[in-house]
Amino acid sequence: MRPLPRFMATLTALALILPVAAPAAGTLPVLPLAPVSAADETLLADQRGTWDSPTGSEPDVAKDFQPPAKRWLSGHRGVDLTVQLNGQIRAPADGTISHVGTVVDRSTITVDHGNGLRSSFEPVDSDLKRGDTVRKGQVIGTLANGDHCFFSIRACVHWGVRLRDEYVNPLQFVGAFLPSVLLPVPD
């Protein structure tokens, strides 16, 4: 018989990966699943578009952020990004490693960026240790065996970002939702 904590961890992990209906085109949520304070909204606005893609190239999204209608329902609380052939995963912003290890059956790593923002990646193998400081663009690990995107032709990594305990769409930090700016056409 499995111990209860392991069983609960498995159920929690399943809730994070079970598919849900995709939102309508053009309605990808940017903000957290729950209301945030004015200070947190300012923080999100200040960070928007300032991070690098963790794959070292423009983000190639295999599966979008699909938050659930209610916090306890299944959803996709991050994005799946295709990974380059070298399999390297990079720190999207400066931070400190707050977790390296296995969650249920996947190797994971989490970077604490400060101000309540944390990035988590799976499946990623890393030699870094809790407390190590990382710089934006630094390789923090490589894609582990047991590719996350079994539905995709290319290997990919799951990238989740939390603001305190609420998941937010990671793509806002790499500029995927910045407004377009039209420039004048030279004469």
Image (spheres, rainbow, N blue to C red):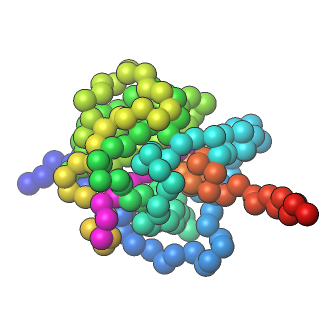
Q: Residue furthest right?
A: 187
- Percent x, y of residue 50: 63, 40
Q: Which residues are magenta?
A: 153-164
- Picture quarter with the N terminus: bottom left
- Left or right of residue 91, residue 124 in this image: left
Residue 11 point in image, percent of width and height: 29, 59
Percent of width and height locating residue 15: 37, 62
Magenta stretch contains residue 144: no
Q: Determine the residue positioned at 75% across, 58% down.
A: 179
Residue at position x 42%, y 66% from top?
Answer: 62
Q: Quadrant of residue 14?
A: bottom left
Q: Is residue 179 above or below residue 132?
A: below
Q: Taking 53 as reference, is 150 left or right? A: left
What quarter of the picture does the C terminus occupy? bottom right
Q: Position of residue 43 (x, y in %)?
A: 70, 38
On whether residue 155 falls in the magenta region, the answer is yes
**Residue 70 image-quadrant placement:** bottom right
Instruction: Identify whether 110 is placed above or below 66.
Output: above
Left or right side of 159 for 174: right
Q: Quadrant of residue 96?
A: top left
Q: Residue furthest left?
A: 1
The answer to whether any part of residue 40 appears in the image is no
| Between 11 and 17, the one nearer to me in the picture | 17
Measuring 30% from the left and 27% from the top, which residue is drawn there?
128
